[in-house]
Image (cartoon, helix red, strand yellow):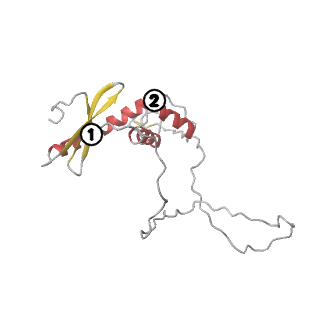
Amino acid sequence: SKQRFKKNPPSEPKGKLGAKIGHEKWEREQPTPTETIEHTETHCSKCNHKLGKPIKIARKLVEDIPEPQPVQVTEHLINHYKCEHCGKIIVPKVKLPQGSFGYNLQTEIALLNVDARLPLRKIKSILKRSYNLNITDAHIYKMLRNMSNKLSPEYEKNIQLIRASPFVHADETGMNVKGKNYYLWVFTNGTTTIFTITKTRSKKTIN
């Protein structure tokens, strides 16, 4: 299941770009503008004569990403009360993340690590460049570990769904983890898919 391919540099596509003759041309869907800027002139740049209404308005859409955004820091003031009748301390029920970093940041870190497959140092660099956020590798690792622990019950639930299926497709492939050989396994029944990493190809993984 493990194949080796030579890494050749990417080459320029041969022939003409675009749809072939007879094929329907694919056009990217035009996005809805989030901002409109109108460019105007009041006087002729050649003779300085005053200009009237435009004879034509050309429309051009430009998609871009925003400038690096500063981190949004929200201060939460949680009032504590003491009931004069029974003496109980009353604290408002609030849903706040564990630690000092919000859910959006935690989600972004998880996507960078799992979906983009970036190491901690790269994630740290991206957060600094995009949001001017200073965060240590240790904090990033701690957040990933906490999120993994929270998802463990759902992962175990999917394992039980796989085991209860009348059929399961399985495969494995070798992978390198810090210079050591490991195996990445995948199990799926068509609707549920789980992955696991082991040190060996032992059948204990299947059991």
Q: Secondary structure at mark 1?
A: strand
**Residue lying farthest to the left in this orientation:** 166
The residue pinned by badge 1 equals 195
Q: Is residue 60 left or right of residue 146?
A: right
Residue toward you, 21 or 2: 21
Q: Is residue 67 left or right of residue 49?
A: left
Write the residue at 14% across / 48% down.
167
Residue 196 image point, x, y percent? 26, 36
Residue 70 image point, x, y percent? 59, 41
Question: For residue 82, what is the image quadrant?
Answer: top left
The residue pinned by badge 2 equals 139
**Residue lying farthest to the front in this orientation:** 15
Q: Is residue 191 left or right of residue 180?
A: left
Q: Split into 4 quadrants, where in the image is the C terminus?
A: top left
Question: For residue 200, what is the image quadrant?
Answer: top left
Nearer the N terminus, badge 1 or badge 2? 2
**CA distance for labels 1 and 2:** 25 Å
Residue 170 image point, x, y percent? 20, 42
**Callout 1 crowding tier (Cα within 10 Å): few <14, some 14–19, many ≥20:** some
Q: Split into 4 quadrants, where in the image is the N terminus?
A: top left
Write the residue at 44% across / 40% down.
112
> In the image, which is nearer the foreground, mark 1 or mark 2?
1
Write the residue at 59% across / 43% down.
68
Residue 39's place in the image compared with 146, above or below, is below
Residue 97 image point, x, y percent? 43, 38
The amino acid at mark 1 is: Phe
Residue 44 visible, this angle: yes
Q: Secondary structure at mark 2?
A: helix
Write the residue at 67% across / 70% down.
57
**Callout 2 crowding tier (Cα within 10 Å): few <14, some 14–19, many ≥20:** some
